[in-house]
Amino acid sequence: MDPSSKEVLDKALVLWFPGPNSFTGEDCAEFHVHGGPAVISSVLSALSLIDGYKPAQAGEFTKQAFLNGKLDLTEVEGLGDLIHAETEAQRKQALRQMEGDLGIIYTEWRTRLIKVTQSDFLK
């Protein structure tokens, strides 16, 4: 609805994701509107009147998820791989990476290296 004219702009779906359980860890709203240029323009114009509103840039949700500790670097890379996957094998590999498989391996390696380093240091 246009805040000044009270005119209905679209029959849309709005989804609310409260933090910290959202993808980014922050409160987040998604607007699912019909994709015509006039609809998008009018909805964005109305939203721009809200104090503190800013549209997300490409990759911004992933960046916030990483900065808020919701994703590690390997999961972020997996998401990028998923977005660019062209084959079924690439899609499956990217999903495994997004689910943290690679991060688990790296964590195990890190733990082993720390133990080896500590034991060598203590000798």
Image: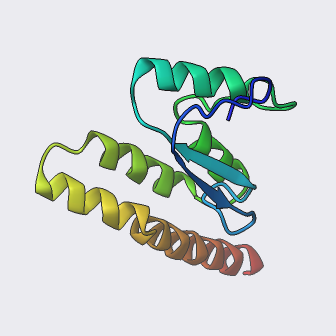
Q: Residue at x 70, y 26 (%)?
A: 46
Q: Residue at x 41, y 50 (%)?
A: 79
- Left or right: 112, with 91 as reference point: right
Relative to 70, is 77 above or below? above
Instruction: Find residue 65 and report its horizontal and vertical position in percent.
Output: 64, 52
- Left or right: 51, with 53 as reference point: right
Quadrant of the frame with the C terminus? bottom right
Relative to 115, is 95 above or below? above
Q: Residue at x 52, y 30 (%)?
A: 58
Q: Nearer the viewer, residue 105 or 37?
A: 37
Relative to 17, is 64 above or below? above
Instruction: Find residue 94 and report its horizontal and vertical position in percent.
Output: 31, 56
Q: Nearer the viewer, residue 60 or 4?
A: 4
Which colour style is shown? rainbow
Q: Nearer the viewer, residue 52 or 102?
A: 52
Relative to 74, is 33 above or below? above
Q: Residue at x 19, y 52 (%)?
A: 90
Instruction: Find residue 51 and report its horizontal and vertical position in percent.
Output: 87, 30
Instruction: Find residue 99 and report its horizontal and vertical position in percent.
Output: 42, 69
